[in-house]
Image: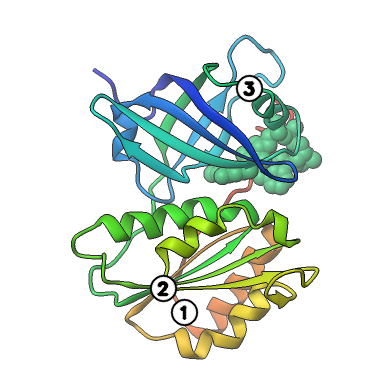
Amino acid sequence: MRRPGGIEKGIIHYNREAGHGHYVMAIELPRIFGDSLPGQFMMIRKPGFNSPLLARPFSIFSRKNMEEKTVVEVIYRVVGTGTELLASCEVGDILHVMGPLGRGFYVDNRLRKIVLVAGGVGVAPLSFLAEHCREHPARKHLEIISYMGARTETLLVGIERLELLCDRVKVATDDGSRGFHGAVTELFSQDIVLDGGDETGFYACGPRAMMRKISEMSAGSGMKCQVVQQVTPLLVRGG
Ligand SMILES: Cc1cc2nc3c(=O)[nH]c(=O)nc-3n(C[C@H](O)[C@H](O)[C@H](O)COP(=O)(O)OP(=O)(O)OC[C@H]3O[C@@H](n4cnc5c(N)ncnc54)[C@H](O)[C@@H]3O)c2cc1C
């Protein structure tokens, strides 16, 4: 019997460049992935290659359940050998996929509003969270406010979907090419007083510096924030 966390064969449906060095890939997987929760991830490896030997982790961006299959999307940024190999994959190629892994976000049914803070590819689990809430009978009326940041406008990968799902999306770019000129945490910190309160849940995912800032802010304000760390342990790197 199939169990979550086993290694499954995935078939690539598409693998599109969506911004400089950023890709959105859709993979057809067995129905076991149909129960994936926002915040969970999967380990992906292209079989037949020794370098890298180990699978790489990627957050689930979306999943669509079909009769017997589930199509899962990921957003990835090319940073090294594993992600370069993924970028070279074509429609119909086979991948080895282990998952879904991790605990996923907790959404308290008493919440009235959720605030998402995404940096770069950190948008993937947060967009999935917004989608999941919109499909959930007890959560679809939640107010969803998003903050998304990237280096420049063309790297706001996944923002269109966020705009469809959320009541409001506030944007920050490091170079000022779209929205607020500066870090997304700076933009978010201007609103944090307005967005606080027990009926608001905060969720964040992004680069290390952004997560450090968010944790400092949450320690100082009492804001309860759940985060996804997209930081690969040293053991995995280069393996
Ligand atoms: C739970 C989890 C979820 C993740 N989800 C996503 C996702 O949705 N999209 C995505 O693009 N990435 C995600 N990542 C990061 C992704 O796994 C790494 O970018 C990937 O493993 C790099 O593999 P590589 O072989 O291309 O690079 P490597 O050859 O292993 O490394 C190349 C260079 O990139 C640096 N590097 C490697 N990993 C990271 C990292 N996580 N952050 C910063 N620098 C790094 C290395 O230090 C090295 O300098 C996630 C990581 C974790 C742990």
Q: Position of residue 38 (x, y in %)?
A: 39, 50
Mark carried by residue 89: 3
Q: Indicate whether 79 appears above or below 121.
A: above
Q: Quadrant of residue 36?
A: top left
Q: As drawn, which residue projects farthest toward the right?
A: 175
- The one nearer the camera, 44 or 142, is 142
Q: Residues within 10 Å of mark 1 (few under 14, many from 20)?
A: many
Q: Position of residue 169 (x, y in %)?
A: 52, 71
Secondary structure at badge 2 equals loop
Residue at left offset 24%, top offset 57%: 136
How far is the residue under mark 2 from the one under mark 3?
Answer: 35 Å
Q: Indicate whether 4 appears above or below 120.
A: above
Q: As drawn, which residue projects farthest toward the bottom?
A: 193
Label 1 CB, ligand 1: below 8 Å? no
Label 1–label 3 contact, CB within 8 A: no
Instruction: Name the mark nearer the viewer: 1 or 3.
Output: 3
- The one nearer the camera, 110 or 172, is 172
Q: Which residue is mark 2?
A: 167
- Mark closest to the chain's N terminus, 2 or 3: 3
- Mark closest to the chain's N terminus, 1 or 2: 2
Callout 3, which amino acid?
A: Cys
Q: Position of residue 211 (x, y in %)?
A: 62, 64
Q: Residues within 10 Å of mark 2 (few under 14, many from 20)?
A: few
Callout 1, which amino acid?
A: Met
Residue at left offset 56%, top offset 53%: 158
Give the colouring mode of the picture: rainbow
Secondary structure at badge 1 equals loop
Q: As drawn, which residue projects farthest toward the top?
A: 48
Q: Residues within 10 Å of mark 3 (few under 14, many from 20)?
A: some
* Left or right side of 182 for 131: left
